[in-house]
Image (cartoon, rainbow, N blue to C red):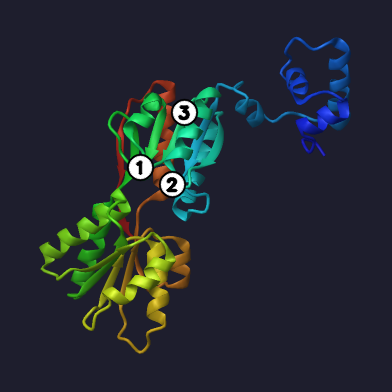
Amino acid sequence: MQNRLTIKDIARLSGVGKSTVSRVLNNEGSVSPQTRERVEAVIRSHGFTPSKSARAMRGQSDKVVAIIVSRLDSPSENQALRTMLPLLYQHGFDPIVMESQFETRLVQEHLHVLQQRNVDGVILFGFTGLSAAMLAPWQEKMVVMARDYPGISSVCYDDDGAVKLLMQRLRQLGHAHISYLGVQETDATTGMRRYQAYLDTCRELKIPPVAALGELSYQSGFQLAASVVEPHTSALVCASDTIALGAMKYLQQQQPLAPIQVCAIGNTPLLNFLFPETFSVELGYGAAGQQAAQQLLGQLSGELGVRQIIIPSRLA
């Protein structure tokens, strides 16, 4: 089948090295006519055509952008990614998707490789630990998601507004004892900003704060829920849908406790499917992905300068 063959296979069938096959594919010199003919005969007989993205990764394309996600299994980042790709394809760019796993070292390695391969631009999903100095060489051709850095374009979510929307809605519904499950403040957005917004809104609404901070995981939500559910607790705000799923699992096991209204930030389909009674805030992951792609394309074409964009939140 076309493209089933690899360069390694062609080299083996031709009796040459992979570097020789690469030179033939790239139409470079320093290959004898006899060797070139032997390699091309194998290529023709198997219908091999090198993909455009493979050529791009060899630094031969002027139309390549990289997208560095933090986790390939992140529902929120996947929503953003799905809106980026059509725009990039539409403008003739080959996207390369890479994963950082929240490791600064991996981001540094990825950016080094991308620079060597002359990639035009990068959309980077940011996280705590990345520095402006590390990203500075990409200043004019980078957009960072969910974090902002001086002199670099960013697309951020309204973390403060998301929490305030939930708190205000709960207060309107008569809730006076609203607890909070969040992420450690070492995380600047999901952690510190959302927790601080909870504390600020508690002061404004004269609600006694009851909170616990842990990790961004189902397990953390499940384990910490008991520490914030008090006898008078009537509502629980979770910093993310992931944490809310763990908290809901805990509450299911605590019958016959009085019902507690659980709220979350993210509005992911899984939470809505499993627990439709939860309140959720839509952060705008899809809109953010589209804005990031448009911003990068505008910068690469010279039509847009560096900008900081904030996606407004809304109650789902």
Horizontally, is 284 left or right of 231 in the view?
right
Q: CA distance from mark 2 to mark 1?
A: 9 Å
Q: Secondary structure at mark 1?
A: loop
Near mark 1 (Cα within 10 A), the count class, few <14, some 14-19 or many ≥20, is few
Mark 2 residue type: Phe
- Please give the residue where the numbered disc 2 appears in the rendered image: 102
- Please give the residue where the numbered disc 3 appears in the rendered image: 121
The label on residue 129 is 1
Is label 2 in contact with label 1 (beta carbons under 8 Å)? yes
Question: x, y (%) of residue 116?
Answer: 53, 23
Mark 1 residue type: Gly
Towards the viewer: 165 or 111: 111
The quarter holding residue 146 reads: top left
Q: Secondary structure at mark 3?
A: strand
Horizontally, is 111 left or right of 279 in the view?
right
Earlier sequence position, callout 2 versus callout 1: 2
Question: x, y (%) of residue 274?
Answer: 47, 72
